[in-house]
Image (cartoon, rainbow, N blue to C red):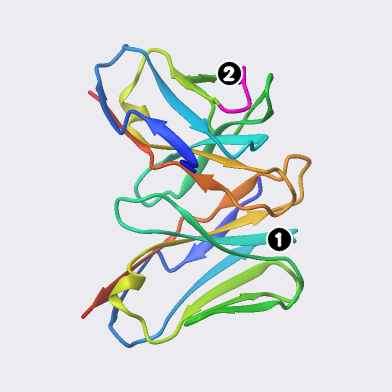
Amino acid sequence: NAGVTQTPKFRILKIGQSMTLQCTQDMNHNYMYWYRQDPGMGLKLIYYSVGAGITDKGEVPNGYNVSRSTTEDFPLRLELAAPSQTSVYFCASSSGRRGSPLHFGNGTRLTVT
Amino acid sequence: GQQVMQIPQYQHVQEGEDFTTYCNSSTTLSNIQWYKQRPGGHPVFLIQLVKSGEVKKQKRLTFQFGEAKKNSSLHITATQTTDVGTYFCAGDYGGSQGNLIFGKGTKLSVKP
Protein backbone atom coordinates (compact mmCIF):
# COMPACT_ATOMS: atom_id res chain seq x y z
CA ASN A 1 0.00 0.00 0.00
CA ALA A 2 1.32 3.40 -0.97
CA GLY A 3 -1.01 5.22 1.44
CA VAL A 4 -1.18 8.95 0.68
CA THR A 5 1.01 10.15 -2.18
CA GLN A 6 1.79 13.80 -2.82
CA THR A 7 3.53 15.38 -5.77
CA PRO A 8 5.71 17.32 -6.26
CA LYS A 9 8.01 17.14 -3.23
CA PHE A 10 9.47 20.58 -3.83
CA ARG A 11 8.46 23.55 -5.96
CA ILE A 12 9.56 27.13 -6.40
CA LEU A 13 7.01 29.55 -7.83
CA LYS A 14 7.25 33.15 -8.85
CA ILE A 15 4.69 35.59 -7.50
CA GLY A 16 1.51 35.42 -9.55
CA GLN A 17 2.11 31.95 -10.95
CA SER A 18 -0.35 29.12 -10.44
CA MET A 19 0.12 25.46 -9.70
CA THR A 20 -1.68 22.33 -8.57
CA LEU A 21 -0.50 20.14 -5.74
CA GLN A 22 -1.50 16.56 -6.35
CA CYS A 23 -2.72 14.12 -3.70
CA THR A 24 -3.94 10.58 -4.13
CA GLN A 25 -4.73 7.83 -1.63
CA ASP A 26 -5.28 4.12 -2.09
CA MET A 27 -6.97 3.33 1.23
CA ASN A 28 -10.50 4.00 -0.02
CA HIS A 29 -10.87 6.74 2.59
CA ASN A 30 -13.84 9.04 2.26
CA TYR A 31 -12.29 11.96 4.12
CA MET A 32 -9.38 13.93 2.73
CA TYR A 33 -7.69 17.08 3.99
CA TRP A 34 -5.17 19.71 3.01
CA TYR A 35 -3.04 21.30 5.73
CA ARG A 36 -0.29 23.85 5.63
CA GLN A 37 2.50 23.89 8.16
CA ASP A 38 4.48 27.02 8.92
CA PRO A 39 7.44 26.94 11.34
CA GLY A 40 6.27 26.93 14.95
CA MET A 41 2.61 27.26 13.92
CA GLY A 42 1.39 23.71 13.83
CA LEU A 43 -0.97 22.51 11.14
CA LYS A 44 -3.68 24.71 9.70
CA LEU A 45 -6.58 23.19 7.77
CA ILE A 46 -7.05 24.68 4.31
CA TYR A 47 -9.83 22.56 2.79
CA TYR A 48 -11.35 19.20 3.42
CA SER A 49 -13.66 16.75 1.69
CA VAL A 50 -15.98 14.11 3.11
CA GLY A 51 -16.48 12.33 -0.18
CA ALA A 52 -16.36 12.65 -3.94
CA GLY A 53 -18.08 15.81 -5.09
CA ILE A 54 -18.12 17.40 -1.62
CA THR A 55 -15.60 19.95 -0.39
CA ASP A 56 -15.60 22.56 2.34
CA LYS A 57 -13.40 25.34 3.65
CA GLY A 58 -11.14 24.95 6.62
CA GLU A 59 -9.44 27.59 8.72
CA VAL A 60 -7.25 29.20 6.02
CA PRO A 61 -8.87 28.72 2.56
CA ASN A 62 -8.10 32.08 0.95
CA GLY A 63 -5.94 31.79 -2.14
CA TYR A 64 -6.65 28.10 -2.65
CA ASN A 65 -9.16 25.90 -4.41
CA VAL A 66 -9.86 22.19 -4.37
CA SER A 67 -11.90 19.61 -6.21
CA ARG A 68 -12.82 16.01 -5.44
CA SER A 69 -13.98 14.24 -8.56
CA THR A 70 -12.95 10.77 -7.31
CA THR A 71 -12.51 9.11 -3.94
CA GLU A 72 -8.78 8.73 -4.56
CA ASP A 73 -7.74 12.22 -5.65
CA PHE A 74 -7.87 15.59 -3.93
CA PRO A 75 -5.80 18.22 -5.76
CA LEU A 76 -5.09 21.64 -4.27
CA ARG A 77 -4.92 24.58 -6.66
CA LEU A 78 -2.98 27.76 -5.93
CA GLU A 79 -4.02 30.71 -8.06
CA LEU A 80 -1.83 33.84 -8.20
CA ALA A 81 0.82 32.58 -5.78
CA ALA A 82 1.93 34.99 -3.05
CA PRO A 83 4.96 34.90 -0.69
CA SER A 84 2.54 34.25 2.20
CA GLN A 85 1.83 30.85 0.63
CA THR A 86 5.40 29.72 1.17
CA SER A 87 4.90 26.70 3.40
CA VAL A 88 4.92 22.94 3.65
CA TYR A 89 1.67 21.42 2.46
CA PHE A 90 0.39 18.10 3.74
CA CYS A 91 -2.45 16.07 2.35
CA ALA A 92 -4.13 13.60 4.68
CA SER A 93 -6.92 11.07 4.59
CA SER A 94 -9.05 9.22 7.11
CA SER A 95 -11.94 6.80 7.15
CA GLY A 96 -14.08 9.52 8.68
CA ARG A 97 -15.20 7.45 11.65
CA ARG A 98 -15.12 9.44 14.88
CA GLY A 99 -11.56 9.41 16.19
CA SER A 100 -10.06 7.69 13.20
CA PRO A 101 -6.43 8.70 12.66
CA LEU A 102 -5.20 10.94 9.87
CA HIS A 103 -2.77 9.37 7.40
CA PHE A 104 -0.46 12.02 6.01
CA GLY A 105 1.46 12.22 2.78
CA ASN A 106 5.13 13.16 2.73
CA GLY A 107 4.39 16.80 2.03
CA THR A 108 5.18 19.40 -0.61
CA ARG A 109 7.62 22.17 0.22
CA LEU A 110 6.58 25.27 -1.69
CA THR A 111 8.54 28.49 -1.96
CA VAL A 112 7.04 31.59 -3.58
CA THR A 113 9.54 34.31 -4.50
CA GLY B 1 -12.83 29.91 17.99
CA GLN B 2 -11.73 26.56 19.28
CA GLN B 3 -8.09 26.42 20.14
CA VAL B 4 -5.71 23.89 21.58
CA MET B 5 -2.78 25.35 23.49
CA GLN B 6 0.35 23.23 23.69
CA ILE B 7 3.40 23.82 25.87
CA PRO B 8 6.30 24.01 25.89
CA GLN B 9 7.17 25.03 22.34
CA TYR B 10 10.69 23.59 22.67
CA GLN B 11 12.33 21.16 25.05
CA HIS B 12 16.00 20.22 25.14
CA VAL B 13 16.90 17.23 27.28
CA GLN B 14 19.87 15.03 27.97
CA GLU B 15 19.43 11.46 26.85
CA GLY B 16 17.91 9.50 29.70
CA GLU B 17 15.93 12.44 31.10
CA ASP B 18 12.15 12.51 31.08
CA PHE B 19 10.03 14.75 28.87
CA THR B 20 6.45 15.98 29.11
CA THR B 21 4.29 18.05 26.79
CA TYR B 22 0.90 19.44 27.73
CA CYS B 23 -2.22 20.40 25.80
CA ASN B 24 -5.09 22.50 27.06
CA SER B 25 -8.45 23.44 25.63
CA SER B 26 -10.88 26.02 27.02
CA THR B 27 -13.82 23.80 26.07
CA THR B 28 -14.50 20.10 26.43
CA LEU B 29 -13.04 17.80 23.83
CA SER B 30 -14.74 14.76 22.33
CA ASN B 31 -11.38 13.06 22.02
CA ILE B 32 -7.74 13.94 21.53
CA GLN B 33 -5.10 12.45 19.28
CA TRP B 34 -1.33 12.61 19.45
CA TYR B 35 1.07 12.68 16.50
CA LYS B 36 4.83 12.61 16.11
CA GLN B 37 6.69 14.32 13.30
CA ARG B 38 10.34 13.47 12.78
CA PRO B 39 12.57 16.22 11.35
CA GLY B 40 11.82 16.57 7.65
CA GLY B 41 8.99 14.07 7.88
CA HIS B 42 5.24 14.02 8.11
CA PRO B 43 3.01 13.65 11.18
CA VAL B 44 2.43 10.06 12.23
CA PHE B 45 -0.47 9.02 14.44
CA LEU B 46 0.50 7.78 17.89
CA ILE B 47 -2.69 7.33 19.88
CA GLN B 48 -6.23 8.48 20.57
CA LEU B 49 -7.75 9.19 23.99
CA VAL B 50 -11.51 9.22 24.38
CA LYS B 51 -12.56 8.64 27.98
CA SER B 52 -12.35 11.04 30.88
CA GLY B 53 -9.24 10.30 32.97
CA GLU B 54 -7.95 7.80 30.43
CA VAL B 55 -4.31 6.71 30.64
CA LYS B 56 -2.61 4.76 27.88
CA LYS B 57 0.95 3.53 27.60
CA GLN B 58 3.14 2.69 24.65
CA LYS B 59 6.47 1.42 25.94
CA ARG B 60 8.16 4.54 27.39
CA LEU B 61 5.32 6.87 26.35
CA THR B 62 2.40 7.60 28.69
CA PHE B 63 -0.64 9.52 27.49
CA GLN B 64 -3.25 11.02 29.80
CA PHE B 65 -6.62 12.64 29.22
CA GLY B 66 -7.91 14.91 31.96
CA GLU B 67 -11.01 14.25 34.01
CA ALA B 68 -12.79 17.21 32.44
CA LYS B 69 -11.60 16.23 28.95
CA LYS B 70 -10.02 19.65 28.51
CA ASN B 71 -6.37 18.74 28.86
CA SER B 72 -3.96 16.01 27.95
CA SER B 73 -0.32 15.17 28.37
CA LEU B 74 2.36 13.01 26.81
CA HIS B 75 5.19 11.85 29.03
CA ILE B 76 8.31 10.10 27.76
CA THR B 77 10.40 8.25 30.31
CA ALA B 78 14.17 8.04 29.82
CA THR B 79 14.35 9.76 26.44
CA GLN B 80 16.42 8.31 23.64
CA THR B 81 17.82 10.00 20.54
CA THR B 82 15.13 8.23 18.52
CA ASP B 83 12.51 10.31 20.37
CA VAL B 84 13.68 13.48 18.59
CA GLY B 85 10.90 15.26 16.70
CA THR B 86 7.85 17.42 17.17
CA TYR B 87 4.90 16.09 19.12
CA PHE B 88 1.45 17.43 18.30
CA CYS B 89 -1.83 17.03 20.05
CA ALA B 90 -5.00 17.36 18.01
CA GLY B 91 -8.35 17.99 19.62
CA ASP B 92 -11.68 16.81 18.27
CA TYR B 93 -14.55 18.98 19.45
CA GLY B 94 -17.19 16.66 18.10
CA GLY B 95 -18.37 18.81 15.21
CA SER B 96 -20.32 17.27 12.38
CA GLN B 97 -17.17 16.65 10.33
CA GLY B 98 -14.94 15.75 13.22
CA ASN B 99 -12.17 18.07 12.13
CA LEU B 100 -9.14 18.13 14.34
CA ILE B 101 -7.63 21.28 15.81
CA PHE B 102 -3.88 20.88 16.11
CA GLY B 103 -1.73 22.37 18.83
CA LYS B 104 1.42 24.17 17.71
CA GLY B 105 3.56 21.26 18.79
CA THR B 106 6.49 20.69 21.12
CA LYS B 107 9.84 20.23 19.46
CA LEU B 108 12.00 17.78 21.40
CA SER B 109 15.74 17.60 21.00
CA VAL B 110 17.80 14.98 22.82
CA LYS B 111 21.48 15.40 23.52
CA PRO B 112 23.36 12.09 23.57
Task: State the image quarter where residue B31 is shown.
Answer: bottom right
Name the residue carrying label 2.
A67
Do we see residue B26 in this rendering?
no
x and y percentages locating residue A31 in the rendered image: 65, 36
In magenta stretch: residue A68: yes
Do we see residue A84 in this rendering?
yes
Name the residue carrying label 1.
B31
Task: State the image quarter where residue B18 is shown.
Answer: bottom left
For the residue carrying disc 2, how many other residues have a C-alpha within 10 Å: few (<14), some (14-19), or many (20+)?
some
| Prevailing secondary structure class for the magenta stretch in the rendered image | loop
Q: Which residues are magenta?
A: A67-72
Query: Where A44 falls versus A55 (above or below)?
Result: below
x and y percentages locating residue A62 in the rendered image: 51, 23
Q: Residue at x 60, y 65 (%)?
A: B24
**Whole-number angstrom distance, CA of label 2 to CA of label 1:** 29 Å
Are both tags, 2 and 1, on one chain? no
x and y percentages locating residue B93 in the rendered image: 72, 52
At label 2, the amino acid type is Ser
Towards the viewer: A3 or B108: A3
Secondary structure state at the residue bearing disc 1: strand
Q: Residue at x 73, y 40 (%)?
A: B97
